[in-house]
Image (cartoon, grey):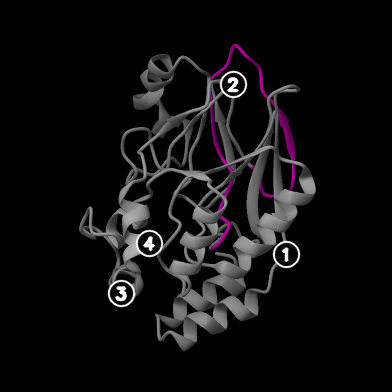
Amino acid sequence: MLYAIISDIHANIEALDAVFKNIDDSGAECVVCLGDVVGYNATPNECVEKIAERGIQTILGNHDAVGCGIEEPWGFNPVALTAAVWTREQLSDESLEWLRGLPDALNYGPFVAAHGAPKNHNTYVFAWEDILPHVYFMDEQNCNICFVGHTHTPAVFSTDGSFALGKEKRVTLEQDRIYFINPGSVGQPRDDDKRAAYGLLDTETMTFELKRVEYDVDRAAKRVREAQLPRFLAERLVLGR
């Protein structure tokens, strides 16, 4: 089966629409979202509606939790805090209800999906050392692949070595190794590549492929400025970091 794995859309409808077109062209049979549908950018309701319309199973991200009021933005930097408060004010009742119903993790059999570290969507996974305290989670889930987001940086972490996925790349996954895979961010990439990122998992060939998609970055940045969100959020879209 071919799965499309998306994450960290962050209220960027231009990026999401472009990624969906690419996914549709890829022939993926199922789309999984690792969370943070909202936050930072200027179209939170549009992104929630698009995901909900497609019936895409979605994990609760930290910005989703703050945006819908399940959690408070403790520890958010000033820019993220400003965007979080703005997002709360913009979300419709329908969007709030949808976000509040999202799970913390989902098991698909061949893999499990989370947002940050398993059982803690606020924890970043930057290296294998960050994963070690959570390896037991894979035994609980009875699988060897976990998809995570949150860092906005594509990467593969495994027991036989970890590496960033700076360019489109296909990785063969072996059954006797544990993998934590980050497909990067749809709506706010931070790896010096402004193109939207997502991943394709083929469970027949057991390969993961990173995909990058061009989108109208200038339009997305303009929306941020028009919403009077911090200008830094518009600038980082253009820079990809």
Quadrant where the N terminus sits is top right
Going by the numbered disc 1, the residue's amino acid type is: Glu
Q: Amino acid at mark 2?
A: Asp
In front here: 230 or 41?
Answer: 41
Q: Does residue 157 appear to the left or right of 25 in the view shown? A: left
Q: Nearer the viewer, mark 2 or mark 4?
A: 4
Marks 3 and 1 close (CB-CB < 8 Å):
no
Does the CB distance between marks 2 and 3 fall below 8 Å?
A: no
Query: Where does residue 60 sit, x and y in percent of width and height?
Result: 37, 46
Q: CA distance from mark 2 to mark 3?
A: 40 Å
Q: Of 131 and 54, which appears nearest the observer?
A: 54
Stretch of the chain drawn in magenta: 165-187
Image position of 182 with respect to 74: above or below: above
Q: Secondary structure at mark 3?
A: helix
In terms of sequence position, does the residue under pointer 3 or pointer 1 come before the other?
Answer: 3
- Of the two numbered discs 2 and 1 on the same chain, state the one appearing first in sequence: 2
Q: Amino acid at mark 3?
A: Thr
Quarter assignment of residue 193: bottom right
CA gap, disc 3 to disc 1? 28 Å
Could you say which disc has been placed on residue 214 in the image?
1
